Every structure is written in C-alpha cells, then in structure tokens.
Image: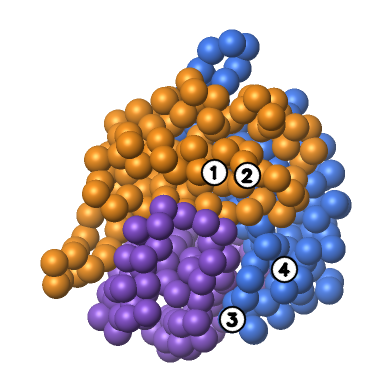
Chain colours: A blue, B purple, C orange
Amino acid sequence: MDVIIFYVTCGSEAEAQKIAKALLEERLIACANLYPAIKSLYWWEGKIQEDHEVVLIMKTRKDLAPKVTTRVKELHSYECPCILTFSVKEGYEPFIDWIKKETGG
Amino acid sequence: MDVIIFYVTCGSEAEAQKIAKALLEERLIACANLYPAIKSLYWWEGKIQEDHEVVLIMKTRKDLAPKVTTRVKELHSYECPCILTFSVKEGYEPFIDWIKKETGG
Amino acid sequence: MDVIIFYVTCGSEAEAQKIAKALLEERLIACANLYPAIKSLYWWEGKIQEDHEVVLIMKTRKDLAPKVTTRVKELHSYECPCILTFSVKEGYEPFIDWIKKETGG
C-alpha cells in the first residue's frame, strides 16, 4: 500500500490549522484531521512537563513523506517536533485513489 | 499479528455510533472508540473545506477486513468515506485473544 | 524503524495520567498523549456496553515493548486492558533520536 498517515503534535489549533492548510495548498496531503484538547506528558529540562497540544493526522502518498516532513518542520514552532508516519495497510479503494489524485499521484 | 484497526471518519457522532453498533451486532468488530469534535480539512470542488467529524477506531481480526469495509461503506452517508486499516504489531495477549473471541475467530 | 507507539484505553484521565507518569519516571516511554472524552462500545456480558474512556498514546523504543506492556497491565484497573502497539514507519530524525535518548537507548 503506497499511502501513509502523518502523526504530528502541535502547540495550538492555530498551528495545526496553519500546517494543514499550507500542505493542502501545496498538494502535499489530501486531507487532515485535527484532534483538539490533547494532554501531553514528557521529559523536559530534567522534569516531567504537562502541556495541551493538538494532534494533526494527515493522509498522503508514501513517496511524499520526505517533502511533507521538511515542510512540517519549516512551518512548526517547535525545535524538535513530533513527526511520525505510519503505513496504511489497506483501505476503501476509491478513497485510496482519491488520496493519490488530490496529491497529484 | 492477525489483528488490525480501522480508521473511519464520520459526519456525526450518531453516524459513528450507528456504524459501530451495527458491526458489533454482526460480530464484525470487537470494540470501537469514538473521537468527537475532530476538525477536518480537505479539498472539495476546487477549494479547501473545513468540517467537523467524528473519528471511529474499530478493532478486529485481519481476515474480516473486506467484510468490514463493505459494511462501513453500505452504512456510511459519504459517497467516498475514509476507511483505512492499520496492522497491530503486538499487544497484551489476553486482549488480542478477546478480539478474536468476540469476532468469532 | 525501531520506534513504536502504544495504544491503551483507560477508565479515566486520572488513570491515563498515572500510567503515563509512572512509565516516564521509569524511562520506559519518551512521551504520552492523552485523548479525553472518548466514547467506547463493546460486548460485555452478553450486551453492547457504552463507556467513556481516555485513550493514551505512548512513544518508545521497540525493544521496550514487553516491559511497557507488563507495567501498563500492572498499573491498569481493567482485568483485560486494551494494550496494542503499532510500528512507526519513519519520522523526523531528531525526534526519533530524542525518543531513544529519553528512554536510555
């Protein structure tokens, strides 16, 4: 399967929306889902930190992964943003085709 | 690992609930998690559209994927619904066994 | 890719937070995202049950999976908790390195 999703955490809904819109306009993703009100816990400067974040899931073609990663990093406010990809195993074929079409594939 | 999850976006909580209940009753899935208040962005008719959706995650056996995909499409209001599957790599063994048992596997 | 995510459902935000904090303190995970207000549907004692849960996503090294699974089970209030892992395909390299560093890898 040549389709993947991106899992990115953002500092605010505005940031998630900015990244999603830019990548849509650049035809680097077909669609995005924003999950508001996420609570995140992680180590930072020697203590466990708690923050509110927005998770951004983006669907695209596998071969666009390097470009998407570069653009998310450029657009993101974090020094070391969480940018992960996961392989889609299967899917409803017309939706898979739609992802490819929307991203010029 | 012979267990997968489905990632489906729905137009409302009522729609996500209708699909989850139908597939539970038909023993095609073992359980479902509904994520409310998702904001989605995508291209539609030449412009970037924004919508509120509900994400539906469903856990089942890998060999039920074709049947689940067909039923979600039948029950779904969208012409081209987002129906994607992801392979579970590993898991707590009794929970994996429970998924199989609940789906007749 | 030697990084995975855990997908765990919890009975409350307090439970999700307790598990996330313990695993952070034990350096078994690098970070966690809590999704509040999830609605879950599943079979229980012969009927379809509905509950509110919190989904806990945790990022760690692949080789820590058995330890993390054991600790989540120990800390969790459920008899048969949903503990699943998914392989990360790729990611922003400094973030992948950060996950490894934070978990002693």
Q: Are marks 4 and 3 on the same chain?
A: yes
In the image, C67 versus B79, the foreground residue is C67
Mark identifier at residue C65: 1
Going by the numbered disc 4, the residue's amino acid type is Val
Q: CA distance from mark 1 to mark 3?
A: 31 Å
Which of the two residues, C64 or A50, is positioned nearer the viewer here? C64
Q: Are marks 4 and 3 in contact (CB under 8 Å)?
A: no
Which amino acid, by three-letter code, is at mark 1?
Ala
Decide: is C68 above or below A34.
above
**Closest to the observer: B80 or C82?**
C82
Residue at (84, 44) in percent of width and height: A70
Alpha carbon separation for disc pair 4 and 3: 12 Å
Determine which residue is flagged by label 2.
C62
Can residue C33 be seen in the rendering of this structure? Answer: no
Q: CA distance from mark 4 to mark 2?
A: 23 Å
Place residue A95 in its image quadrant.
Answer: bottom right
Question: Tag 1, which secondary structure?
Answer: helix
Q: Is residue B71 left or right of residue C75?
A: right
Q: Are marks 2 and 1 in contact (CB under 8 Å)?
A: yes
Q: Is residue A15 above or below residue C26?
A: below
x, y percentage for residue A28?
A: 79, 59
Mark 2: which secondary structure? helix
Extreme-top residue of the structure: A46
- Kind of residue indicated by mark 2: Lys
User: Going by the image, does B83 lie left or right of C35?
Assistant: right
Q: Which residue is mark 3?
A: A92
Q: Do the numbered discs 1 and 4 sit on residues whose CB atoms are within 8 Å?
A: no
